[in-house]
Image (cartoon, rainbow, N blue to C red):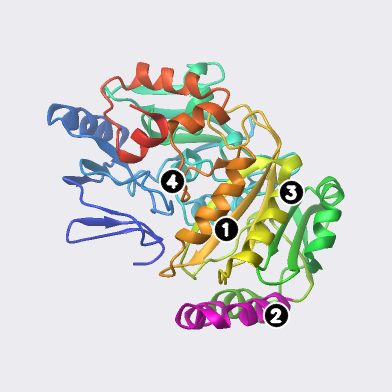
Amino acid sequence: MGSTASAKNGIWRNWGGNVRSRPAREVTPASVDELAAAVRRAAEDGLPVKAVGTGHSFTSIAATDGVLVRPGLLTGIRGIDREAMTVTVEAGTPLKRLNVALAREGLSLTNMGDIMEQTVSGATSTGTHGTGRESASLSAQIKGLELVTADGSVLTCSEKENPEVFAAARIGLGALGIVTAITFAVEPVFLLTAREEPMPLDRVLAEFDQLWAENEHFEFYWFPHTGSTNTKRNNRSAGPEAPVAPLAGWIEDEFLSNGVFQAANWVGRAVPATVPAIARLSSRALSARTYTDIPYKVFTSPRRVRFVEMEYAVPRAALTDTLRELKAMVDRSGLRVSFPVEVRTAPADDIALSTASGRDSAYVAVHMFRGTPYQRYFTAAERIFTAHEGRPHWGKIHTRNAEYFARVYPRFGEFTALRDRLDPERRFRNDYLRRVLGQ
């Protein structure tokens, strides 16, 4: 199965294993023209159309019983413009390949999330982000888009061309059309020094504003059932390069974070009573370390342990309250949570359906090991997040609908009006979009 979603016996499944669908047919277009023809043919057959990347979303945002478009042949870099400092890349290109190719050219994205298995279009269409004081999500780094719309025409969008489509389609949820190429802003490759160190949760919360202000990229993981966190500060550095030594890196990243962690989660799933003890061990297993490397080697890490996830963006000012409430809930509930809670930040941006749209945001992500019942934990966490007008990540588990989103996104109506114009017959519909965007 590798890192991607699979289709066996005509059934498509996502990476997390919690979503499946049975498309009427699959197409793998080799060009934008072939893709446009596939959309027109779907219209003739009265079928909905959905493009799917690697299936890393935990929601059913990519599920379809119509035509499933796989972008596997629409990959690679179309061009690099060193004057404008942009790269144009085909929609199906995995972030991993983009990062490696840019590094070879002496270039880098400014910021990125912590997983790079996804396709560029899948990652941006769901608002995937890392953490940053000034630098925002992948979508906020987009300078141009190419989109096949419901009638099979190809739209080129930027701040100058089709600006109203560009404003919304950078995080389009697959609702406005099928993205075929993306132009990202890039910069000369730089070095980041990462400082990872354990810190008590009380201290992190007390000093959160300072930790945020003093670091270009601050994030931390809190281990439920403990008062411990692991903090990570990434800042630009003049060098020299000092990567993690291969053996130490293998022990920390592969063995501890993936291998032992996987085994610990199997034990925890089989015997939930052991989870708090495992959490205490996990939180102590990671020691402080500092290393300096090019951005994608610092921002991203392999994730081999399968899980399901819910993540909400709350106003940054509400973060400490949100976390204290989450901790009190876990302590009170008798829940057994073996996965750390991840906290990151993003500055406000101007994209209609961005989780950071118009407000400085903090992200709180809760995870459960795949195959463990997660509903009780996620429901209780979601109650806390929504009390702070939280906005869920479009690709992660949540129960919100259009009525809720119209309340927490000031520009929600702008997005749905554009959808009415670009896709009046709902060619790109599915159950998920019906729920989150309304009819």
Q: Which residue is mark 4?
A: 76
Q: Residue at x 84, y 45 (%)?
A: 213
Q: Which mark, residue 321?
A: 3
Q: Which residue is mark 1?
A: 366
Q: Residue at x 75, y 55 (%)?
A: 191
Q: Which residues are magenta?
A: 260-286
Circle 3: residue type: Asp
Circle nearer the N terminus (3, 2): 2
- Left or right, 126 with reference to 21: right
Circle nearer the N terminus (4, 3): 4
| Distance from Cα at disc 4 to Cα at disc 2 | 39 Å
Circle nearer the N terminus (2, 1): 2
Question: Of circles 2 and 1, which is in front?
Answer: 1
| Distance from Cα at disc 1 to Cα at disc 3 | 16 Å
Give residue 82's position: percent from left, percent from top: 63, 34
Is residue 333 shown in magenta?
Answer: no
